[in-house]
Image: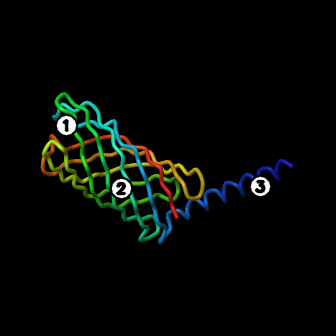
Amino acid sequence: MKNMRKSLLLLFLAAISMSSYAQFEKGTKYVGASLTGLNISYGTGEKFGLGLAATGGYFIEDSWMLLGRVGYDHKWQDGPDFNEATVGVGARYYFKSNGIFLGAGMQYKHAAIDADYLQLPIEVGYCFYLNQHVSIEPAIYFEPCLNKFSDGTRVGLKIGLGFYF
């Protein structure tokens, strides 16, 4: 009886781990939404930022996804508050063994305070699967700004919901 329970547990764990690999296969499509915020910026009087982002992607190879992103952020600061709009492209690499992903890309951010930023965002995150197609994806990001480093560079946290189909 004890051996049977162990065998069933091993079979169950093997089935779960094999199904998580399916999300990272070539040809899989991805749609995600995330809540960004808790930003830390350099050199500005910015106190807090909160934003929403939508992401769409496609796995061109196993574990490699190309993606596009649009976002909206609101920033509270010492002076007048302002909004930012973001458009970007990038890629992610997923480690099949544990669900950790690494991402990098390029994005253009327009702030309502008459500022335009060109950023090279990088992120490290984790996919926690709720089922075979839906995941919760917490991540840490760093967005260095190429044209105005002190005003446009951000570090922050985000949590997203991803759909793989």
User: Which residue is nearer to you in this view: 121 or 87?
Assistant: 87
- Picture coordinates of residue 122, whole percent (x, y): 31, 51
Does label 3 or label 2 sit earlier along the sequence?
A: 3
Does label 1 or label 3 sit earlier along the sequence?
A: 3
Residue positioned 36% across, 46% down in the render:
52
Residue receiving disc 3:
7
* Residue type at numbered disc 1: Tyr
Where is 103 relative to 65, above or below?
Answer: above
Give the total of numbered labels: 3
Residue receiving disc 2:
103
For the residues marked 1 and 2, what is the alpha-carbon distance in whole angstroms? 22 Å
* Residue type at numbered disc 2: Gly
Residue positioned 32% across, 40% down in the render:
156
User: Which residue is nearer to you in this view: 49 or 39?
Assistant: 49
Among all residues in the image, which is located at the extreme right?
1
Residue 21 falls in which quadrant of the image?
bottom right
Crowding at dot 3, Cα within 10 Å, few <14 / some 14-19 / many 20+, comes out as few
For the residues marked 1 and 3, what is the alpha-carbon distance in whole angstroms? 54 Å
Residue receiving disc 1:
42
